[in-house]
Image (cartoon, rainbow, N blue to C red):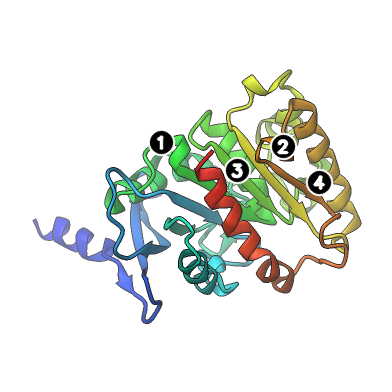
Amino acid sequence: MLAAALSLLLSACATEVGTPGYTVQDGSIRSARLGKDVPYWIALPDGVTQNGPLPVVFFLHGRTNSRHMFRDLGGMGVLVRHRAAGGRPFAVVGLSGAVNGRDTYWVDGVSTRLPWATIVLTELIPQIEARHGLGQSPGNRVLAGISMGSHGAFQLAIKSRGMFDCVAGHSLVVRSFETISREFPGLFGDRTQYAQRDPLTRLTRYRHMSEVPFKHAWVDIGGADDAYFLARAGLMEAQLRRLGFAESRGDHLDVGKERPQGDHSSQYWTARLPEYVAWYDRCLAL
């Protein structure tokens, strides 16, 4: 009884102060695989009356950042203004992509033997949804991420085989085997193991859209971002368009066009965050 009470206390949410129309909290979920509590951040819209679970955006942070990235980019102000303008109220959950101070790249690590993607999909997301009355179906979820988190969003959506209808990669980063092996030695394993964790490789293997385990995609990257990232994002865009993703059906594929001066920075992401939130809303209605 004491252990159960302590576990409940540790998993309780601590409420942040002062966001009109939203309850903003930090909480934690117990991971049986990891054997420890994993923190998350959540913004819940107040005063919503509806039948069934709330729509939810799961937001994946970039390298050296944290579960608070959406909030720290000004996300709460964007949500408040979006809702005041008649936008759909939905929850935003900031997940953690680092364990013991080390970035996981949102994959099941080979050298680390840490199945982080599996933990996120089978432990964290289901428990968070059950606790807060969220999601529960692919059409009621968006998976979005920035930089490292953009790779994570597409990689997790493909790995989950249908948990998410809407996937968004902001400042999309999809590294080759050679570059990811230099940046994260051993994390993605050998070439065969890398291919299972690389969303670009996975997309090249699909013959038509019916095989893709998500229905709608957003890709963006600023025109002043790293030339290598731009080139790789262009390959990702080409594969999505080959498979039939297009603006005419509700997708958004922007590699360096709409913000030619946009770089890989918080200023770029903050400036585009209202567009991101508006697309999450639209995609939840598709």
Q: Which residue is mark 1?
A: 137
Residue 248 disc label: 2
Is residue 111 visible in the rendered image? The answer is no
**Does 241 sit above or below residue 65?**
above
Q: Earlier in the sequence, mark 1 or mark 3?
A: 1
Residue 256: x percent and y percent? 85, 55
What kind of residue is marked 2? Ser
Q: Which of label 2 and label 3 is nearer to you?
A: 2
Of the image marks 2 and 3, the number of the one nearer the N terminus: 3
Mark sitting earlier along the chain (2/4): 4
- Disc 2 and disc 3: Cα gap in Å? 17 Å
Residue at position x 62%, y 37% from top? 216
Where does the N terminus fall, quadrant-wise? Answer: bottom left
Residue mark closest to the camera, 3 vs 4: 3
Which sits earlier in the primary sequence, circle 1 or circle 2?
1
Earlier sequence position, callout 4 versus callout 1: 1
Q: Badge 3 is on which residue?
A: 167
Label 4 and label 1: CA atoms lie apart by 29 Å
Cα distance between the residues tagged 3 and 4: 15 Å
Q: Amino acid at mark 4?
A: Ala
Determine contact: label 1, label 2, CB under 8 Å.
no
**What amino acid does circle 1 point to?**
Ser
On the image, numbered disc 4 is attached to which residue?
Answer: 233
Horizontal side of 65 relative to 147 (left or right) equals left
Residue found at x 52% / y 74%: 77
**In this orientation, which residue lies closer to the viewer: 107 or 52?**
52
Residue 180, image x, y percentages: 76, 47
